[in-house]
Image (cartoon, rainbow, N blue to C red):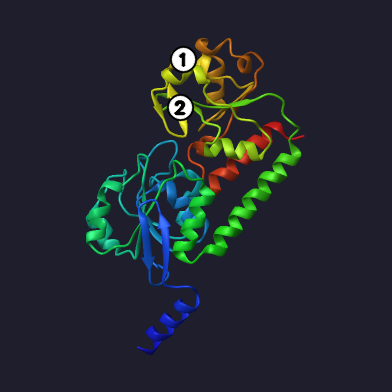
Amino acid sequence: MALAILHGAAALAEGWPRTIAHDGGSLTLDTPPVRIVSTSPSLTGTLLAIDAPVVSTAAAVQGPLTDDSGFFRQWADIARARGLDVLYPNLSFDIEALIVADPDLVIVSETGGDSALAYVPEIEALGFPVLVLNYGVNSWEQLATTLGQATGHEDDAAAIIAAFAERAAEARARIPDQEGTASIVSYNFFGTYGISKPEGVQARVLADMGFTVTGVPEGMQGMIQQSREFDFLSHENLPAAVTGDTVFLLAADETDVRAFLNDPVLANLPAVRSGRVYPLGKTSFRIDYYSGLAMIDAVEAEFAH
């Protein structure tokens, strides 16, 4: 009893209980969570980056973007070093696995293929607090700030945000001023083709490094098939949509660059004719602290003095 009283007093002294505004409304937590589970691999990296007490995460379908456990490659080594468990595999929501994990905070994505939003009422009915975040419209820095508030790791969130900004500024100082514009292209990524919006998360990282990112021309808005951070079009409409003097390929390596340069549909693009097509790295499909740093490294390697 005495220990519980001391713990409660310490929590109150440090600003608990606290109410966190999130994409699902607001959530009040009496004390800092100590057993967090993530139903969204896209958000797990940020939890790891701020050193939050995440104990398990949903795993993605195994493929080139993951390790053998379905952990995204940009944070898989950190997850293993911290003993992170797989909550359930293949993004197949499993309420029984969540019950066994017995979390005091559940992280849910509002959007994307790893969203468990439809199951939030079921999770909350079991008494588990839920924090809903949208990585489609919020930067990883915004997500880190909210997660820091929810976990008591505000200082860790502020520290990685500052470190990331410093790293981007360092890279920018080594990159010559760039003339013209740049397009970020999702090229044949799981069979889709898209152009980043200028406000997209990858675009913001490039902007921090001195690039001016351009999106789909206004006159092509009627050809967009789907729109989130990227505007998706048909392969045939891609040449008219790519207006940048330089092209950066999402989730790509040099093999993907060669495929882009050898695509006859794209042969007349100025960036193709000038050979100004560069990979952002395989982990750039989803930007968190770890994949963002890897993206900065990839761009710096191509453009630095």
- What residue lies at 68% left-to-right and 37% top-to-bottom? 300
Amino acid, disc 1 = Asn
Q: How many marks?
A: 2
User: Is any atom of residue 181 visible in this view?
Assistant: yes
Image coords of residue 261 (percent x, y): 57, 17
Image coords of residue 274 (percent x, y): 67, 16
Image coords of residue 293 (percent x, y): 60, 45
User: In which quadrant of the rendered image does the C terminus lie?
Assistant: top right
Amino acid, disc 2 = Asp
Left or right, 175 with reference to 276: right
Q: Which mark is residue 237?
A: 1
Q: Is residue 259 shown above or below 230?
A: above
> In this orientation, which residue lies closer to the viewer: 9 or 76?
9
Distance in Å between CA atoms under marks 1 and 2: 12 Å
> In this orientation, which residue lies closer to the viewer: 188 or 86?
188
Q: Is residue 152 shown above or below 233?
A: below
- What residue lies at 51% left-to-right and 51% top-to-bottom? 142
- What residue lies at 28% left-to-right and 58% top-to-bottom? 98
CA neighbours of label 1 inside 10 A, class few (<14), some (14 to 19), many (20+): some
Left or right, 160 with reference to 68: right
What residue is pinned by disc 2? 231
Image coords of residue 7 (percent x, y): 42, 81
User: Is any atom of residue 52 visible in this view?
Assistant: no
Give whichever of discs 1 and 2 has the lower sequence position.
2
Where disc 2 sits, the SS reads strand
Query: Going by the picture, which residue comes out furthest to the bottom?
Result: 2
Q: Is residue 132 shown above or below 223?
A: below
Q: Are marks 1 and 2 in contact (CB under 8 Å)?
A: no
Where disc 1 sits, the SS reads helix
User: In which quadrant of the rendered image does the N terminus lie?
Assistant: bottom left
CA neighbours of label 2 inside 10 A, class few (<14), some (14 to 19), many (20+): many
Left or right, 7 with reference to 50: left
